[in-house]
Structures are given as C-alpha cells and as structure tokens.
C-alpha cells in the first residue's frame, strides 16, 4: 500500500532543485484555502528566495479501511494442516458411520446381558445366537470389542466379538445389571450360576 501523507503543507528550498529542469514555477500557490495559516511576512518575502510550496494529498480514513477490507477478502482461507493421526481418526469415524447406517449398535456397557446373532463363516445361511454377560469392553474406534462370558455344558466360555463386524447381524441388550467395575474378571472364580442365563 502506498504511503499515507497527512494533510499538511511542506515548504522546500528550491536551491537544491533546478526549477527549470523540474518545470515548475518558483512559487506554487496552495491548493486549498485551509493553508491560510502561513504568516504574511513569509508570503511577502517568498518571492525573494527561491522556494516553493508542496501540498500533500490527504487520504480519508474510510478509504484506508475499505482498502484493508478488500485486501483481507481477496486472500483465500488457509487449509488446516491434517496430521497422520487426524487422518486415521477421520477414517475411523467414516467407517463407524457406515456401519451404524447398515446396523445400529446399542449402548453396550459392562454388566449388560446381550444376545448376538452371528453368521457362521462356514455356512452363511445359518445364524448362531450367543447370549452372555459383557465382562469387558475395549474401545478402539472401528476395532471396538466386547468379551462375553457364559457357562455352556458346565464349562465357562468367553468369546470376544468385534461389535462393528459385518458378520454380526444383530446385537440386542436383554437386561442391564448394575456393576461397580469396568472388568468383571472375578466371575471366573465365582459360582457358575452367576454366569448362567436362560
């Protein structure tokens, strides 16, 4: 942006400049009547000395603001820098949204008794149902897993299910139990009836 001059009059000695080369007269009258503050004694003796008057152009404050606003508007917005960790987070969110649109996942917590309908990989036509208590949940974005425990034929069985797997067709919360721990591994040492569900 060009320099901004204040509305004032500059008196310069013409001896430093050659009037004939510049092509100006020895005295330039002021452009505006606002420069009437020059003393009369100076005006009377100005012709004896070689000097001239220069008037600086004034720039309104509104014009300055308008120029700064237009300069700001012309600049395109900067794109945010995306780091590798952010990219993985974005991909995880997109995968979770795609999975939720096809099969919504309920709010699973430790202590819930859940029923899972799973497609057996060997035979796609048959659905096997697993029912048990959630003894732990591992949050890892699209790789979130839950561990289900149940007593089958007198033996405690624990199965880990990825909740966003395409092989799982339905997850249903049958009952919610109030627990005070995030991991219910102590059920392994308790009586079998605590892990048995009809």
Image: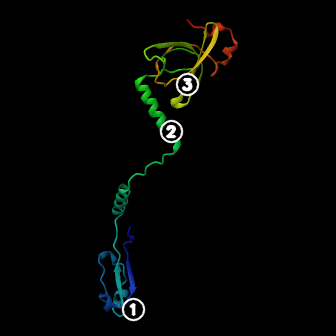
Image quadrant assignment for residue 48? bottom left
183 is higher (above) or lower (below) than 44: above
Task: Work out whether residue 7 or residue 80 is closer to the camera in this orientation and state it.
Answer: 80
- Sequence-wise first label, 2 or 1: 1
Q: Name the foreground residue: 93 vs 37.
A: 93
Closer-to-camera residue (186/122): 122
Q: Residue at x 43, y 52 (%)?
A: 78
Q: Which mark is residue 145?
A: 3
The residue located at (44%, 22%) in the rendering is: 104
> Which secondary structure, mark 1?
loop
Instruction: Please indicate whether residue 72 sits to the left or right of residue 82 in the image.
Output: left
Q: Which mark is residue 88?
A: 2
Q: Is residue 149 visible?
A: yes
How far apart marks 3 and 2 lie (CA) works out to 18 Å
Residue that numbered label 1 is attached to = 15
Q: Quadrant of residue 70?
A: bottom left
Could you tell me residue 113's position as x and y percent? 55, 13
Pick out the residue farthest to the front: 122
């Amino acid at each position: 942006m060009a320099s901004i001059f204040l509305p004032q009059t500059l008196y310069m000695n013409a001896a430093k400049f050659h009037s004939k080369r510049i092509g100006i007269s020895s005295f330039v009258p002021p452009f505006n009547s606002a420069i009437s503050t020059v003393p009369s004694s100076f005006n009377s003796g100005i012709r004896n000395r070689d000097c001239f008057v220069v008037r600086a152009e004034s720039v309104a404050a509104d014009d300055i603001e308008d120029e700064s606003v237009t300069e700001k508007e012309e600049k395109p917005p900067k794109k945010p820098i995306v780091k590798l960790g952010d990219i993985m987070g974005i991909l995880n969110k997109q995968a979770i949204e795609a999975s939720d649109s096809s099969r919504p996942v309920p709010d699973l917590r430790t202590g819930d008794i859940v029923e899972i309908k799973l497609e057996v990989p060997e035979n796609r036509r048959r659905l096997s149902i697993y029912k048990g208590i959630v003894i732990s949940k591992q949050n890892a974005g699209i790789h979130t897993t839950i561990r289900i425990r149940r007593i089958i034929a007198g033996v405690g069985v624990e199965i880990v299910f990825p909740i966003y797997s395409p092989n799982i067709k339905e997850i249903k919360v049958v009952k919610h139990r109030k627990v005070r721990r995030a991991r219910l591994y102590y059920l392994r040492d308790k009586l079998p009836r605590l892990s048995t569900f009809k």
